[in-house]
Amino acid sequence: MFIRNTEHLLTGFVFFIVGMFFGMYGLIFYETGTVEEMGPGWFPFFISVGLMVLGIVQAIRSIATTKYGVVSFEIARPIFITALIIGMSYAWPYIGAITALGLIMSGSGLLNPKYELKWFLVSWLFIIILIIAFKYGLGMSIVLWN
Amino acid sequence: MELVALGFETVFSNYTWLYCIFGIVLGTLVGVLPGLGPTATISMLLPVTYGLGPIPSIIMLAGIYYGSQYGGSTTAILLNTPGESSAVMTCIDGNKMTKNGKAGPAIFAAGFSSFIAGVFATILLVTLSPMLSVLALKFGPAEYCALIALGFLSVGILTTGDIFKGIGMCFIGVLIGTIGTDIQTGVIRFAFFDELEDGISFPIVAIGLFAFAEIIKNITKDEAMQLYKGTIQLFPSKEEFKRIIPPSIRGSFIGSFLGLIPGGSSTISSYAAYAVDKKYGNKDAEYGEGAIEGVAAPESANNAASQTGFIPLLSLGIPENATMALMLGALLLTGIVPGPDIVSREPELFWGLAISMLFGNLLLVILNIPFIKIWVTVLRIPYNTLYPIIIAICCIGIYSINSNVNDVVITAVLGLAGYICLMLRLEVAPLMLGLILGPMLEEYFRRAMMFSDGSLMIFVDRPIAFTLILCAGVLGIYGLYNTLRNK
């Protein structure tokens, strides 16, 4: 018995984990009730069970299939860009939107060696104008600069 | 006639027509730019719909959608790079025509056939949707439940081609939809921090799973566009013009029909139209070698499908693809609940949208044909220059919803999750559908069970509900067979 299709296996894993998380959490913290009078936990619980079953089916398919499949994806750049956005979002109230967005843009631009400084400056200027328009035109509550 | 007049009045008052123009220009632009599709663009613009109101919002978003179908053909023809998945078939003959020095006639064929299809589909929209309103009074909780189940199955199967993955993603969407306050009992569910007490806002999920995920995917590809440098001859000969019309009509029929079926997206329509035209069309045409029919058929089909897709969306609340799911979200955000009675309940929205489509299609011909060189110039901007600015615009858009940075954080995390889904070939469209329709399904299912004292026989006893369940069953068996055959 060996894994022929990692795509099916990983999909099954995702389904099972998500289903188990919602199912267990719902079962512990919310009343399920009866089918006539459903409690807040009834519907999410049964959907979770369905998702877990699908997860198991996917895992079985990864072994039973005749179609070989390998999943490959890059981790470094997606993690970097996500962490950059999260970090700058938390810094946003302290350093202001202009600096935070400038850092997001320059940081994400670094991921591509062909990204040029002049493009960054033009883009940043455009974004500054856009934020000012949002703040003064649409009345958005936003800290521009700190 | 009064209703048509109402449509004109709606479009040409309060500057609504300006939103239509903005939508189609932006749509054409994103259609031309590979990597930035209508789904990502509409998700970015969802926060704007809060302030615009339902009619200008939906007219603008619809303009982006069908505008992108036109724009997507330009890069397909000139650069063999489809701006949209629905333009893939246009590449085959369109790019061959470019190489044969006939880029102009190819672009004209794409624009003109799309125009024919647009007009045809708009007429169909106006004719068919009111007919569905007679069903409105016969719909109770059981029928709505069955309809939603059918929607889940059809979108789950037809968008992914794998029933297990499609339904699984639907279920994940439904579970995300349960986050927040349960309307029936008032209990707050799965709210792990304060911001989630009202549920996850739809634009946040949409921007995360579509726009951010797409950006992350494109960043990891390291691709750059090249500019087309050939000479563009604009108009076709008389002979070529005559050859455009029959495949356009055939494509319009096929696209209009497939657009009505939830999941029968414009991409499938363009494949089907090309295949049918190749088999039954002009026998002298050399398909695959630069036949003008090979451009007209798929282009008319994808445009017709993108417009008739509004019929199930508005009348039944079933989106035919991810973009339509976002459109459904935009409708709900602005307080419009789709349903069979939408024509009588929201006549201004319905007739305004129909007339805006006619107006928009005419404008698209004007835009796409004479200004084609301008669109080609857009291709000078490489994607690696664009994405930082798109990220920044997304961040501003998300922040503007609640003025809360935590929303941006949630979106970034969802973006990473969306990227993983893309890599695992898990379509996000069924998830979005689950998220949108999940709360409705729970509500209607609860009501149906209350009425029937917990008996599932309510789905058998009521004829419409039974028919819909039967259709779902047949579709389920088909999906299962298809999935297992491909393993």
Image: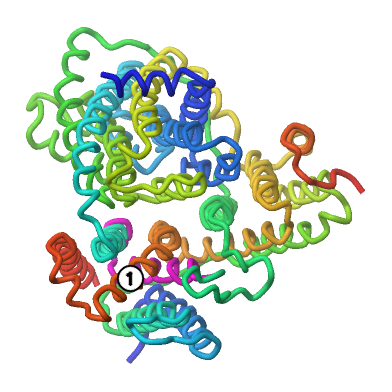
Left or right: where does residue B84 sit relative to residue A110?
left
The chain that hosts pointer 1 is B
Residue drawn at 48 percent across, 87 percent down = A31
- Residue that sits furthest to the right in the current view: A146
Task: Tell me the kind of residue under disc 1.
Answer: Phe
Membership of B164 in magenta stretch = yes
| Residue B223, x across and y down, in percent | 55, 45
Bounds of the magenta segment? B156-179
| Residue B7, x across and y down, in percent | 36, 23
User: Looking at this view, is B281 or B429 the one in front?
Assistant: B429
Left or right: where does residue B79 sit relative to residue A68?
right
Residue drawn at 39 percent across, 30 percent down = B348
Residue drawn at 39 percent across, 69 percent down = B442
Quarter holding the N terminus of chain B is: top left
The secondary structure making up most of the magenta span is helix
| Residue A27, x across and y down, in percent | 48, 88
**Up/down of B239 relative to B484, above or below:** above
Membership of B302 in magenta stretch = no
Q: Quadrant of residue B378?
A: top right
